[in-house]
Image (cartoon, rainbow, N blue to C red):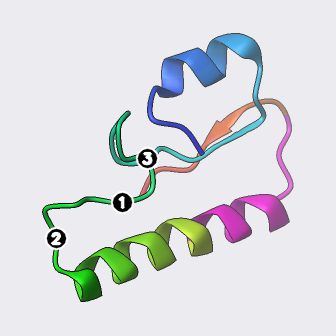
Amino acid sequence: MCTITPVSVTVGANRIIPTIAIPHPLGNPALTKEDEFKLRRHLVEKALVALQTPVDGQKVFED
């Protein structure tokens, strides 16, 4: 999970999940508490799917 996906690609990460922003990679303080919880849950679920997905080389898991 990263905010700057080109850096992850450059260093050779095989599973890359884009996140929100550098100061808040897994959240958005402008959202309500409930909406931020939904956002964080979505990102974690996406990461769990990425971990279960067989990859050959690098893969960026976009929405």
Image coords of residue 3 (percent x, y): 45, 35
Q: Which mark is residue 53?
A: none
Residue drawn 48% across the image and 44% down it: 18
Return the residue at label 1.
27
Residue extent of the magenta highlight: 46-56
Q: Is residue 16 left or right of residue 24?
A: right
- The answer to if 47 sits in the magenta stretch is yes
Q: Are marks 1 and 3 in contact (CB under 8 Å)?
A: yes
Around disc 2, counting alpha carbons within 10 Å, would you say few (fewer than 14), some (14 to 19), or many (20 or more)? few
Secondary element under disc 2, as helix, strand or loop, is loop
Between 26 and 53, the one lying in front of the other is: 26
Q: Is residue 50 above or below residue 40?
A: above
- Counting other residues with Cα less than 10 Å from the Cα at mark 3, is it few (<14), some (14-19), or many (20 or more)? some
- What's the mark number on residue 31? 2
Is 57 one of the magenta-colored residues? no
**What residue is rendered at 36% in x and 72% in y?**
39
What is the chief secondary structure element of the magenta stretch?
A: helix
* Residue of label 3: 25
CA gap between label 2 and label 3 equals 14 Å
